Amino acid sequence: MIILTPDDVRKRYGQLFAQKFLVMVDEKAGLAEIREQCRARGTIEWDAANRLRAKGALRSACVEGTTMTMLASLGTSPAQFGAADREIGGQALEGVEVQGDEVVTIWSGIAGAGVGVAACLPQAPGVIRAEYPSEEDLKIGGARKNRVRIVSPRYEKITIGIDDTDTKEEGATWVLALQCAEACSIPGVEHLNMRLVQLNPAVPKKTTNCVGSALNFAVRPGRVDELLAYVRDFIESRAVSDDTGIAVYRGLAFADESEYLRRVKTDILTVPEAEAEAERLGIEYIDSTGRKGRIGALGAVLWANRGLEAAGLYGEDL
């Protein structure tokens, strides 16, 4: 086995195009979420199409701008290149392994796609080292097949829902939530994204739009408590409402589907209902008020990774 650092890879092949690589793990669910950022959208879309075709350990992949988000199963699953073989190339995620404080993702590629996994991805910021099975795997281009094991730090995903920090007279929850995320400088904490979640606009007690805010973070082991304390203190010290709710979920997937995914957008709920459903799903409230903001905070967590539909009314055809 040949082991190269990202600097070694750059020296060997020159500076290429990968700009970020990050892996979050949820061992209870048997899943990993992989974030990969490239300098160009075309390459990331082509990689996504090829990896989905090859299957392997990959369950899903989506592209937003120049970033691909992949959901994968833990363990190994041989790729099925099919028609995308030596004639037109191919690329696959064959496995994800957790090794203590590190995560190993296992890749294979053929032809130009082999250059991507052997020379480009291993030099991305976030990679610790790349392990090549043999010298042949270091020869890129042409019709060659390349294999590599990419080692990166282990993260977990933390989703935080926030609601009711404002009043009809002042404040905006989405502004405060985004300020909180952007001001976070805790080592080992990466802010992934922020999402506005449209809740039921027909509820009688609201400001105007009835929108909750969700923050997603990738967090290194041992940093979760520090992050949650920071978020609670930042939000509650700046909120202008006494009804602020803050809900937290640790993981990549819920064990059960929740009817509240719909109900927070269509029904008028009570705080006890929201609290009971949060407890069932493993969502924790960290606010100190225990008031109506907990309903919207639950809704923000439930919709935090749902894309454009999170911002719309339930069932709306946008």
Image: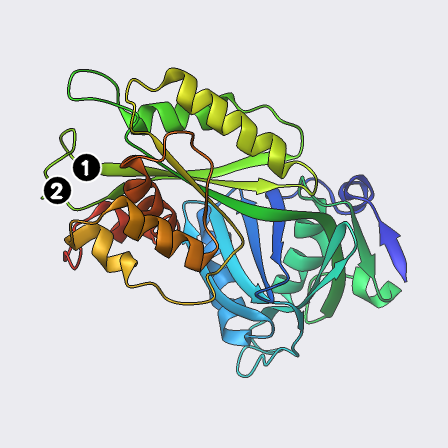
Q: Amino acid at mark 2?
A: Val
The residue that disc 2 covers is 203
Image side of residue 16 versus residue 208, left or right: right
Q: Quadrant of residue 317?
A: bottom left
| Label 1 environment density (alpha carbons within 10 Å; few <14, some 14–19, many ≥20) | some
Which sits in the foreground, 55 or 251?
251
Nearer the N terminus, badge 2 or badge 1?
A: 2
Image side of residue 143 versus residue 85, left or right: right
Q: Amino acid at mark 1?
A: Cys
Residue 210, numbered circle: 1
Examine the rendering and report whether any part of residue 144 can be seen. Answer: yes
| Label 2 environment density (alpha carbons within 10 Å; few <14, some 14–19, many ≥20) | some
Q: Quadrant of residue 73?
A: bottom right
Give coordinates of residue 135: x percent, y percent.
88, 63
Which sits in the foreground, 283 or 7?
283
How many marks the image carries: the answer is 2
The answer to whether the residues at label 2 and label 1 have Cβ atoms under 8 Å apart is: yes
Task: Label 1: state its secondary structure.
Answer: loop
Which sits in the foreground, 190 or 272?
272
Task: Label 2: state its secondary structure.
Answer: loop
Nearer the observer: mark 2 or 1; the answer is 2
Q: What residue appears at the point 37 percent right and 30 percent down from the top-left corner?
A: 289
